[in-house]
Image (cartoon, rainbow, N blue to C red):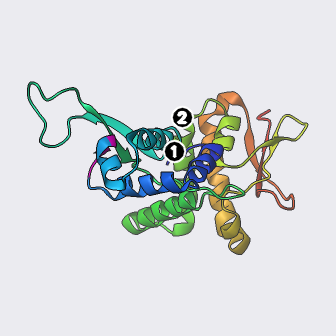
Amino acid sequence: MARLPWADRMAALASLGDEKRRQLFELVASSPGAVGRDDVAQRTGLPRSTVSFHLDRLVQDGLLAVEFHKPPGKAGPGSGRPAKMYRPVAGEIGASVPDRNYDLAGELMAAAIEKSTSAGEPIEDTLPSESWRVGNAMAEAAETLQDFLVQAGYRPQPDGDGGFLLPNCPFHRLSDKHPGVVCAMNGAFLQGAAARLEASGGRVVPADVPGHCCARITPSA
């Protein structure tokens, strides 16, 4: 469930604002396998230097990945060095302003429904338990609770008492319509992360700050 940082996702999508770059991305994305610069240049009629520049920019912006191997039909001694080939990244890249993470909400709910169905447990029990488990697992990649909150899209702000307010709710539209369900899910998700990152301090408590997330972080002590 790891995502690129919000700024990187915005930059990746902005990269496609260039018409030539978007044309090249669509060509690579629609190809059955990785393609090389010469093939792309031939199919688009663009100079190889132009193609190379834009393809490498798409790699830099996280939209394409690079691999090195010999094109089909070229193998064995004397066939030359492996060529630089391009393919679309495996995952999806999406960004919104403010940052939202409805994919994560969907995954938490799907995991809870799956467990509820297989174990015969009420969904009101499996949703918080699965949310806690996922939050705990995702936090393994973060060094501190604050880092995790930033990566997850909460935009933590120091509250002056050693804790953090969370001005952005990654599940805003859902929580606005279904606050009881989504806020319980969100609280359990954050509690799982806080448990994993206990050494960095922080306790998840309910919050009632207009325009903010339904939770906030207070010092563990």
- Whole-percent x, y for residue 202 in the image: 74, 37
- Whole-percent x, y for residue 108 in the image: 52, 59
Q: Residues within 10 Å of mark 2 (few under 14, many from 20)?
A: few
Residue at the left extreme, as displayed: 76
Query: From what the image shows, is residue 200 above or below residue 63?
Result: above
Q: Tell me if 156 is positioned left or right of 89 in this view.
A: right
Q: Tell me if 168 is positioned left or right of 87 in this view.
A: right
Secondary element under disc 1, as helix, strand or loop, is: loop
Secondary element under disc 2, as helix, strand or loop, is: helix
Q: Residues within 10 Å of mark 1 (few under 14, many from 20)?
A: few
Q: Is residue 180 visible?
A: no
Q: Report the magenta residues as a range.
A: 33-37
Mark 2 sits on what residue?
A: 141
Q: Which residue is drawn at the image coordinates 13% and 29% (left, top)?
A: 79
Q: Which residue is drawn at the image coordinates 68% and 73% (left, top)?
A: 178
Spatial distance from mark 1 to mark 2, Cα to Cα?
A: 9 Å
Q: Which residue is drawn at the image coordinates 34% and 49% (left, top)?
A: 40
Mark 1 sits on what residue?
A: 2
